[in-house]
Amino acid sequence: MVATVERLGIVPGYAINVPTTPTGVFTASVYPDDITFERVIHHDRYTGEVLYDAGLEDLGTLGRWAEWGISVHMGQEWGLLNQIVLLLACLAMVMLCVSAATMWWKRRPSGALGIPTVPTDWRIPRTLLGMAVVAGIFFPLVGLSMLLLLGIELVAHMIGRRRKFA
């Protein structure tokens, strides 16, 4: 299989997956830093016949744009400059998280969490709740984090009510 895929011109750094079922195929794939050399080749496990051989040019416009976006996102497109820009973006997001927690801590009422009061007019909160539910469905980790925060809010609310009546 190694000799076959190399004869077909696959670039170094490829991986070969061996079939694990009677109907499985050999798959040689490579995803180098230069996306123009990406390639996937499937071979029949019994005859060695090439069943599928596709590179970047076979993906179509949307597929090529997606691969390019992934390459930029992974810091492979423009070398060190791309990686520095991504590092700066990452540091900016970390600083946003740290500064948000710091601002909340400094602005909260002394001795309290600073949880907003329950609104009397539910028209806007109902719309925001609907948007949050939709976001939670389309982005499951966002939904999970919102459920976690809801749990924390409910516990904080119950503790506050218990202290109020004690």
Image (cartoon, rainbow, N blue to C red):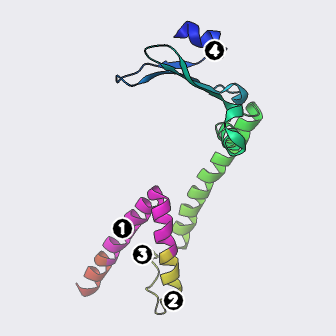
Closer-to-camera residue (151/57): 57
Q: Taking 151 as reference, is 14 above or below it?
A: above
- Between the residue at mark 4 and the residue at mark 3, the CA separation in whole angstroms equals 60 Å
Q: Residue 17 location, x and y as percent?
A: 46, 21
Q: Earlier in the sequence, mark 4 or mark 2?
A: 4
Q: Residue 56 location, x and y as percent?
A: 69, 32
* Residue matched to label 3: 112
Q: Residue 12 bears which disc, if any? A: 4
- Between the residue at mark 2 and the residue at mark 1, the CA separation in whole angstroms equals 24 Å
- Between the residue at mark 1 and the residue at mark 4, the CA separation in whole angstroms equals 51 Å
* Residue depicted at x 57% and y 57%: 97
Q: Earlier in the sequence, mark 1 or mark 4?
A: 4
Residue 5 visible (yes or no):
yes
* Residue depicted at x 42% and y 75%: 112
Disc 4 to disc 2: CB gap under 8 Å: no
Q: Is residue 156 magenta?
A: yes
Q: Earlier in the sequence, mark 2 or mark 1?
A: 2
Amino acid type at mark 4: Pro
Q: What is the total number of numbered labels drawn onto the structure image?
A: 4
* Residue matched to label 2: 123
The dominant secondary structure in magenta is helix
Q: Which residues are magenta?
A: 131-157
Q: Taking 109 as reference, is 134 above or below it?
A: above
Q: Residue 81 location, x and y as percent?
A: 77, 35
- Between the residue at mark 3 and the residue at mark 1, the CA separation in whole angstroms equals 14 Å
* Residue matched to label 1: 152
